[in-house]
Amino acid sequence: MATVLTLATACASGTAATTATAPPAVRVTSCGLPLEIQAPPRRAVAMEQNAAEIMLTLGLADRMAGTAYRTDPVLPELARSYAKVPVLAAQYPGREALLAAKPDFVYSMRASAYAPEAAGSRQDLAKLGVPAYLSANDCEDRALIPATAEFEAIFKEIDDLATVFGVRERGQAVVADLRRRLEAARRAAPAQLDADVMWYYSGTKAPAIAGDTGLPGTITRLLGARNAFADVEQQWPEGNWEEIAARDPDVIVLADLTRGGDGDSAEAKKRFLREDPVASKLTAVREDRFIVVPGSSVDPSIRAVTAVEQVGQGLTRLYSQKESS
């Protein structure tokens, strides 16, 4: 009996010790929804490539039960890690496919991932004990989306994820490096730049172009240029070539998409612009003032600073040539 009592006491003591040393729950708010994560997730699902790349940059490949919706070649430095993560669907997995992966955390940068035909609402996932994080850039409640896409929001998101997974120091290092690169790109941009820039995402008959509230507007301002559609509040409004011709941008940034739709790739855009009766008369087209960026880099993500670097380098190339000619 004494032995049993001693064993029971030891077990109770061990339980108390374990409870005492257990890490506290992490609480974050995502697009107005409070999330409580009792322990660092072990089976997280990233609902699209940009979300997966943030997680992989934080060194979380071994904590991922799945990913989905790849739109571009994965960043070279992350390709080996990405290849180890199960792909749940070509686009968004449905609720059944998601739950089959037994996730303990879901992360998406797009509200569409939580549509009824996809994973279902975050509130419903919470009822199943699965916290679901959503980027501030695309909240379900549009009133909660910040007026402009700022880099500080991206940095906070990285910090949130790092906190949730218990890798805060790694997150801080990632953000510090991104800040350094962002400042270097800003300093390297041409001084006293006099240029109207149009960002062309997709489509030909009704092109998707960048208004002032998305990441392209923020990048354009940071580099000292002007967004040709700065008066348009939507992130990606549907444009028309007559209006674009009236504004006649000096430079066109082309999003290079790999999905294969009408006017998706940068080369398809260039062909259209050079052949279309209206678009071919644009100053930027006639003078071949194009800058190409990966399609996935024009939305807030780990790639956003790379977009600043690429556009800044492109403006330097174009305007250095102009000054020397």
Image (cartoon, helix red, strand yellow):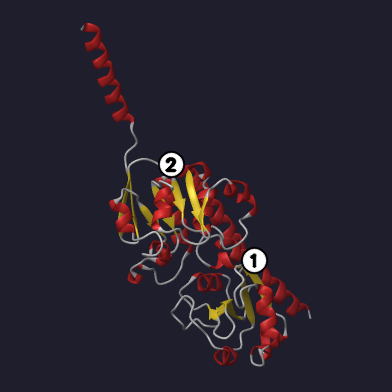
Residue 67, percent across and down?
50, 53
User: Helix, strand, or loop for circle 2?
Assistant: loop
Alpha carbon separation for disc pair 2 and 1: 35 Å
Can you tell which quarter of the image residue 277 is in?
bottom right
Q: In this view, which residue lies farthest toward the right? A: 325
**Residue 264 in view in this figure:** yes
**Residue located at (54% from left, 88% from top):** 240
Q: Nearer the viewer, residue 148 or 127?
A: 127
Q: Which residue in the protein does label 1 denote?
A: 310
Judged by depth in the image, the label closer to the viewer, 2 or 1, is 2
Residue 57, percent across and down?
54, 49
Category of crowding for the residue at label 1, using alpha-carbon neighbours closer than 10 angstroms: few (below 14), some (14–19), many (at least 20): some
Category of crowding for the residue at label 2, using alpha-carbon neighbours closer than 10 angstroms: few (below 14), some (14–19), many (at least 20): some
Q: In this view, which residue lies farthest toward the top? A: 2
Residue 237, percent across and down?
48, 80
**Residue located at (46% from left, 68% from top):** 149
Image quadrant holding the N terminus, namely top left
Residue 176, percent across and down?
53, 51
Q: Is residue 300 above or below residue 211?
A: above
Q: Which residue in the protein does label 2 denote?
A: 42
